[in-house]
Image (tube, grey):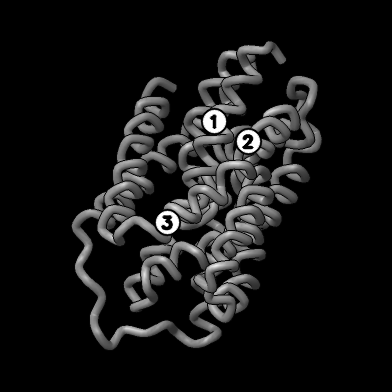
Amino acid sequence: MTPVLVVALLVLGACTGLAAGLLGIGGGMLMVPFMSMLLDHIGFPHDEVVKVAIATSLTTIVFTSASSVRAHHARGAVRWDIVRALAPGILVGSLLAAHFAHVVPGRALAAFFGLFIGWSAIRMLVGRPPAPDRTLPGAPGLAAAGATIGALSALLGAGGAFITVPFLVRRNVPTIAAVASSAACGFPIALAGAVGYAWAGRDLALPAGTVGYVYLPALAAISVASMTTAPLGARLAHRLPTRTLKRIFAGLLAALAAYMLSRALRG
């Protein structure tokens, strides 16, 4: 890698780590679009760029999530009972979705990424307040929700907060607890997704430094930087008001949705 590329990856890692701690998003929603740009520049096959970006993004979240969760756990914000109930479904959904993504054209994945997170941004901005009596479902319902969260996250290269946070908030889990618990859910999502993508892409002829769809040089640079800034984001999350967190979250999603839709249209 060139020095310019290393610096670009370190900056991307620092920004995504901050986002992981602040919003519980694991950084994937930022990482996939920007990493797609970088992989295009390096010369990865065009139809594999989005898949490599998604797989590498998921793998970095293994490290980012661990760093972010430690900071949230130290403040007592993580609802571990919710995390444990969601985790089995998350593991199954993430593994299956990684294998499904292997056979889907990269352009279709980019379009799905853009449409889904654009819809998520709109819901975050105009969504109705939760009903006062709305509570979390039982264990089977949480396992099913976990499978949905895991599958969508593995298809989008994200830590799952784009669906986990709204899901929990609409069931009257406080926003900061929803963000912290979502960060904890990012670990099983990322671990299962990374294994799935590494296995699914094992026979591909990609540039040196890849294991399946995972690009190791980018993984190393981004992980080091993101683990450094994730605790800072977690501390900021406990100081910013809920309304501000929602606006930041929705703004990020809307901007990245526009980029990925434009990429899908370009082919």
Q: Secondary structure at mark 1?
A: helix
Q: Name the residue at 49% across, 81% down.
A: 141
Q: Residues within 10 Å of mark 1 (few under 14, many from 20)?
A: many
Q: Position of residue 177 (x, y in %)?
A: 45, 70
- Residue 12 tag number: 1
The residue singled out by tag 3 in the image is 237
Q: Position of residue 47 (x, y in %)?
A: 57, 26
Task: Indicate the quadrant where residue 2 lies.
Answer: top right
Q: Is residue 2 above or below residue 170?
A: above
Q: Are marks 2 and 1 in contact (CB under 8 Å)?
A: yes
Left of 179 or right of it: where is 230?
right
Residue 153: tell me if it is visible: yes
* Residue in front for this viewpoint, 107 or 127: 127
Q: Secondary structure at mark 3?
A: helix
Q: Residues within 10 Å of mark 2 (few under 14, many from 20)?
A: many
* Residue in front for this viewpoint, 37 or 264: 37
Q: Are marks 3 and 2 in contact (CB under 8 Å)?
A: no
Q: Name the residue at 65% across, 72% down.
A: 88
- Residue 225 tag number: 2
Amino acid identity at mark 3: Ala
Q: Position of residue 12 (x, y in %)?
A: 54, 30
